[in-house]
Image (cartoon, grey):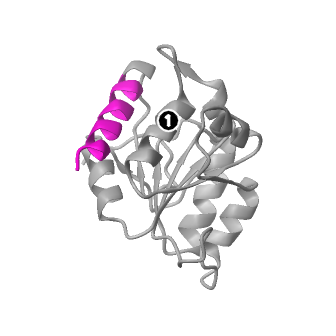
Amino acid sequence: MATAESWQTAEVPGPKKALIISKPEVVVAMVKRARRPVLIVGHKAVEVEMEGEKLIDYTIKIASSMRISVVATAHTIKGFLERGFEKAFCMPIVDITNRLQDIDWKGLDGKGQYDLVLIVGIPYYMDWLVLSSLKHFSKLKTISLERFYQPNATWSFPNISVEEWIKSLNKIVSGLEAK
């Protein structure tokens, strides 16, 4: 199995590291198999532009194609509302991280715990801490959709170019849209 190194060199994740997403179809299969997935979207999603589209546009396509709850952190909710996507919940990243670790929390809609967390648009150092916390204090599976390897996730892309990242996100979107 292929390995990857942390993008932030001084961080040491421990012996348990993320499996590499070598094919975007892995993400599609995991999301389709999940009982209750949640997508956490950070403020970088409204700032990062890729080939004329913002990262938030990809997250909306992902969320619209499946039954995924969306948590918008920081001021990201404004980007969702400007695009007519009103199904996102607004919550600070630290708050959603703590709630995801609470076994008694019934989720954003009150229908029960989540079993899969997808995360994108969070600064790398913060993503590291959120995923480390979820890795050590919950039983959730986590997928980092960032373009840099995130060893504290259950699954992560290796360090990839922007072009490869765009291709992968497009494959995820098209795979989820295909029923």
Quadrant in the rendering for residue 56: top right
- Percent x, y of residue 8: 60, 37
Which residue shows up at 45% across the image and 70% down it?
Answer: 115
Which residue shows up at 34% across the image and 46% down it?
Answer: 20
Q: Which residues are magenta?
A: 164-179
SS under mark 1? loop
Which residue shows up at 64% across the image and 56% down it?
Answer: 130
- Percent x, y of residue 122: 64, 42
Which residue shows up at 26% across the image and 42% down it?
Answer: 175
Comparing 32 with 168, the one in front is 32
Outermost bottom residue: 104
Mark 1 crowdedness (10 Å alpha carbons): few <14, some 14-19, many ≥20: many
- The answer to whether residue 168 is left or right of residue 121 is left
Asked whether 109 falls inside the magenta stretch, the response is: no
The residue type indicated by label 1 comes to Phe
- Percent x, y of residue 151: 49, 50
* 14 to 158, vertically: above or below: below
- The answer to whether residue 71 is left or right of residue 53 is right
